[in-house]
């Protein structure tokens, strides 16, 4: 099978492997959930020592305990962002063909007319 693109594929253009992406998302999820556990522990300590402005500190910890897990799940399920040049590169072909030429179907040729030379 012959390649249609004349440019070679560079290894730097390759994305992360799915295993690497999964490990990165798992580490980020564990880090964010650790922040949530930290908010829970800090909130419990603040209640036991009866810190000044307790309502303010508990509301900050409460927002951390509610918002951080939601963001952790969203980010854990999200894939890596697409590179802008990769998406645009598929529409530009070498030789000056623009985006309208990609996937264009050539116009059908009209049927040949047969002229009978004999009357």
Image (cartoon, rainbow, N blue to C red):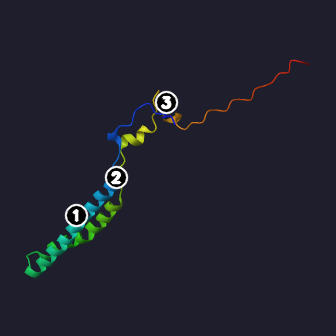
Q: Badge 1 local density, few (<14 within 10 Å), some, or many (20+)?
A: few
Distance in Å between CA atoms under marks 2 and 3 = 30 Å
Q: Residue 115 placed where, x, y %?
A: 83, 21
What numbered label is drawn on residue 111?
none
Q: At x 46% / y 38%, what residue is drawn?
A: 91
User: How far apart are the two marked residues, 1 and 3, measured between alpha carbons?
Assistant: 48 Å
> Few, some or many C-alpha atoms within 10 Å of disc 3 (few <14, some 14-19, many ≥20)?
few
2 or 3: mark nearer the eye: 2
Residue that appears at 26% across and 66% down: 68
- Is 19 rendered above or below residue 97? below
Residue hosting label 3: 97
Q: Is residue 118 above or below residue 110?
A: above
- Residue at the spot 36% in from the left edge and 43% down from the top edge: 84
Residue 55 shows in this picture: no
In the rendered image, which residue does mark 1 sit on? Answer: 31
Where residue 72 sits, quadrant-wise, is bottom left
Residue 80 image label: 2
Against 111, residue 28 (above or below) is below
Query: x, y (%) of residue 4?
Result: 49, 34
Task: Tell me, yes or no, if residue 77 can be seen here.
Answer: yes
Answer left or right for 37 relative to 73.
left
Q: Secondary structure at mark 1?
A: helix
Which of the pair 89/7 is nearer the observer?
7
Q: Nearer the viewer, mark 1 or mark 3?
A: 1
Q: Secondary structure at mark 2?
A: loop
The x, y position of residue 102, in whole percent, is 52, 36
Contact? badges 2 and 3 (CB < 8 Å): no
- Depth order, front residue of 15/71: 15
- Which class describes the residues within 10 Å of circle 2: few (<14), some (14-19), or many (20+)? few
């Amino acid at each position: 099978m012959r390649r249609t693109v004349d440019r070679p594929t560079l290894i730097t253009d390759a994305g992360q492997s799915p295993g690497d992406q999964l490990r990165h998302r798992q580490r980020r999820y564990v880090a964010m959930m650790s922040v949530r556990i930290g908010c829970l522990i800090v909130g419990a300590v603040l209640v036991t020592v009866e810190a000044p402005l307790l309502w303010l500190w508990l509301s900050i910890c409460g927002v951390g305990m509610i918002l951080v897990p939601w963001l952790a799940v969203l980010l854990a399920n999200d894939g890596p962002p697409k590179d802008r040049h990769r998406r645009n590169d598929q529409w530009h072909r070498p030789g000056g063909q623009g985006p309208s030429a990609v996937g264009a179907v050539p116009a059908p040729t009209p049927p040949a007319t047969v002229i009978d030379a004999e009357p």
